[in-house]
Amino acid sequence: MEQEFDLVKDCSQKILAINDTMEILNGKWKMSIIACLCYKPMRYSELLKEVKGISGKMLSRELKDLEINELIERHVLNTAPVAVEYQITHYGKSLKQLTNTIADWGFIHRQRIISGMKNTIE
């Protein structure tokens, strides 16, 4: 009986942790932004080109939210005109394995769906 309670408690704690994570990483764009910045610091315009389909307004909003959650840092560069560069924080780098896992799953899923579509057509 006690083991069963511990399993339910563990499950509840995991669900709470997942909900917390999803709250921070919610939306369509945050994981893509984090994945880009895991590889190199990027300027706003570079991110806008790299994250296909995101609007400028949405990118600004997502960058601010990621900065508030200490996952990225914003650096104003001493250039003319002034440029802003974003980079992943040490804390944000802890998400790199998660982005790789999600990407790996996405590759497998895409191939599975495409294969299934081919089989249906034939």
Image (cartoon, helix red, strand yellow):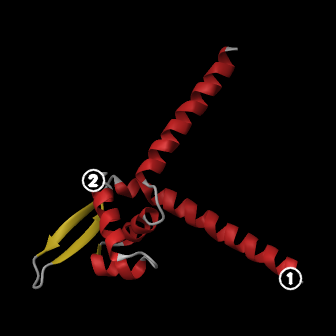
Q: Position of residue 62 (x, y in %)?
A: 35, 63
The residue positioned 40% from the left and 64% from the top of the image is 34
User: Considering only vertical position in the picture, is 103 above or below 83?
Assistant: above
> In the image as oriented, which residue stretches furthest toward the right?
122
The label on residue 40 is none
Amino acid type, mark 1 = Ile
Quadrant of res 54: bottom left
Between the residue at mark 2 and the residue at mark 1, the CA separation in whole angstroms equals 48 Å
Identify which residue is drawn at 69% across, 67% down. Answer: 109
User: Which residue is found at the position 50% from the left and 36% from the top?
Assistant: 16
- Compared with 49, 41 (above or below) is above
Q: Residue at x 29, y 66 (%)?
A: 87
Q: Residue furthest top?
A: 1
Relative to 14, 43 lies left or right: left
Q: Is residue 48 left or right of residue 76?
A: right
Residue 13 visible, this orientation: yes
Tell me which amino acid carries mark 2. Answer: Ile
Who is closer to the viewer here, 92 or 5? 5
For disc 2, the marked residue is 68
* Residue 49: image location, x then y, percent: 38, 82
All told, the count of numbered labels is 2
Task: Compare residues 75 and 29 and report the one nearer the observer.
Answer: 29
Residue 114, position in %: x, y?
A: 74, 77
- Residue 89 visible in this rendered orientation of the protein: no
Quick one: SS at disc 2? Answer: helix
The residue to which callout 1 is attached is: 121
